[in-house]
Amino acid sequence: MKLFGLSSKKRIKPPKPESESKRQPHQQISLSNDVVDCDIAKTTTATMTSPGKLKSSCSELDLDRPNIEDYLPSGSFHEPRGKLRLRDLLDISPTLTEAAGAIVDDSFTRCFKSNSPEPWNWNIYLFPLWCFGVVFRYFILFPVRVLVLTIGWIIFLSSFIPVHLLLKGHDKLRKKLERCLVELICSFFVASWTGVVKYHGPRPSMRPKQVFVANHTSMIDFIVLEQMTAFAVIMQKHPGWVGLLQSTILESVGCIWFNRSEAKDREIVAKKLRDHVLGTDNNPLLIFPEGTCVNNHYTVMFKKGAFELGCTVCPVAIKYNKIFVDAFWNSRKQSFTTHLLQLMTSWAVVCDVWYLEPQTLKPGETAIEFAERVRDIISVRAGLKKVPWDGYLKYSRPSPKHRERKQQSFAEYVLQRLEEK
Amino acid sequence: MGNTSSMLTQYDIEEVQVHCNHTFSQQEIVSLYQRFCQLDRSNGGFISADEFLSVPEFAVNPLSQRLLRMLYGLNFKEFVAFLSAFSPRASLHQKIEFIFKVYDSDSNGKVTFNDMLDVLRDLTGHFISEQEREQVLTDVLEEAGYTKDSLIVLADFVKVLGNSDLKLEVEVPVD
């Protein structure tokens, strides 16, 4: 199967199952809405915007990327040969083919497609087994998990509140205890969906001037990582109970949040970030540079914010095994609560986490190139396909500059042919 | 665990196949139906302009606005018929007819100078001045034996495009 809508020169094939980790040779990517001005503030841990809401962001096309034509279906009109004829003007088939290709299939939509599980139970032998599973999952496993989670919360709150209020004078001790408690409650969360998580590589340590970046599938990424290390994370401000947690508990581990839509938030967050990475006793910083949840088969463009802090960047690759449940949180289709319930009624969430080799900015490398390099490393490790799109296109339309580039190339073609005899 | 394709019966598929002159195989139609449902987020039975434009690769296409007018309110059957020109099984004549329809914005069977100018404007934007555009088009038309006032019909399109190698082909992904 093939992907259309991408240029005919280079198509990104959808991922083959698991084994797929071959990378495409050095893909430079930048079909972004706003690479130039994208900053840290746009990095989020999760998405929470209603589907219909479209905001036009101050979009600037990053024009210094070398291979953009490989990605943009660039009106590849036939080679100039001889004088311009009527046929050359009337033949609009390349542009039409691109449009139809995008209608039939496109790499952007694929990034956010939740794949429904293959039904396996429509078989006389398996059906009773499946029924038994359903009863077991919903009526035994689920209540037990709710109980575990409740106990976890009781333990957590009954120790967190006193620690938070009583140890005001002993900052160091309080921070340490709070860190442990947050890790504890996250372990309870992971236990509540029988998270089978395999961590590979050295555990993150606390030291200044380093930032962790990971690919993003669901808000549970955060919980999975937080279970091992109390990261401070940059996230989108959420409504509802998640928002309440953000402004109370997560604040204590140094999490920073913002509103994707508010420009002034960005500057504040950028500043907070810089301050945070310099502190010696701060929790390690975790950023999801995609800024939105992707279905764990693809990676969308990385926002460059995390890569221009002047720190060491430690890539973290997360790959979910979809054998029991799809861990992708499709925020358009379900609320986070529904998503959690779905996880809690499944057999288990199986995932692999790799802490990869820390990377630093090479001399002469721009933040965008650096971001791409790190994205490469993560994609290869987790077996994800890279697409040239900015995840924020979920919320806004692509910049008109992309269209103008196509128009320009056609205009140049016409004018060039005109001069030939 | 419902699979969207299960909603199409064999009769439905055959009906769609007849409607599009068997340019798509049954599997391709199932694929297209899944895609149609995916794009039709509001479940309205047709894909709105907004839903089409949510595909970035479509939104950046210079002809997207023009195509949107043709795609407006199409149900699945009509949607497949629209795409049938892009099937490898469609005849050259079908493909040329499709291109003609793109030009013929008022669908009266005649393409005027202004129709052609509009398409050329979509394709070149502000990178060619209006004056120059008109000049180019007039020149090319005259060279091909038409004038600025000629009304061009489908037969002319066939004559002009008939012996060129049109590449109007899209492969429907079948999983």
Image (tube, grey):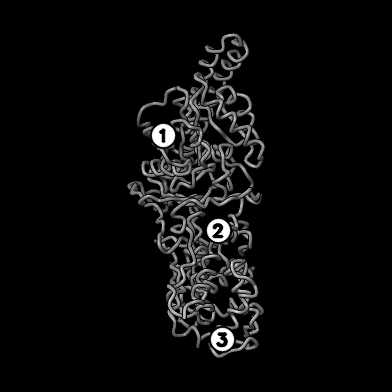
Subunit ID for the residue under disc 1: A
Residue B25 at least partly seen = yes
Q: Is residue B130 left or right of residue A38?
A: right
Mark 1 near mark 3, Cβ–Cβ under 8 Å? no
Q: What amino acid is at disc 3?
A: Leu
Alpha-carbon span between mark 1 and mark 3: 61 Å
Q: Residue at x 64, y 46 (%)?
A: A50
Residue beneath disc 1: A360
Q: Residues within 10 Å of mark 1 (few under 14, many from 20)?
A: some
Q: What amino acid is at disc 1?
A: Thr
Q: Residue at x 58, y 89 (%)?
A: B146
Query: What element does badge 1 sit on?
Result: loop
Q: Residues within 10 Å of mark 3 (few under 14, many from 20)?
A: some
Q: Quadrant of residue A130?
A: top left
Residue beneath disc 2: A402
Residue A131 at least partly seen = no
Q: Which mark is residue B154?
A: 3
Query: What element does badge 2 sit on?
Result: helix
Q: Residues within 10 Å of mark 2 (few under 14, many from 20)?
A: many
- In which quadrant is the N terminus of chain A drawn? bottom left
Q: What amino acid is at disc 2?
A: His
Q: Is residue A18 left or right of residue B52?
A: left
User: Which one is nearer the viewer's eye here, A211 or A161?
Assistant: A211
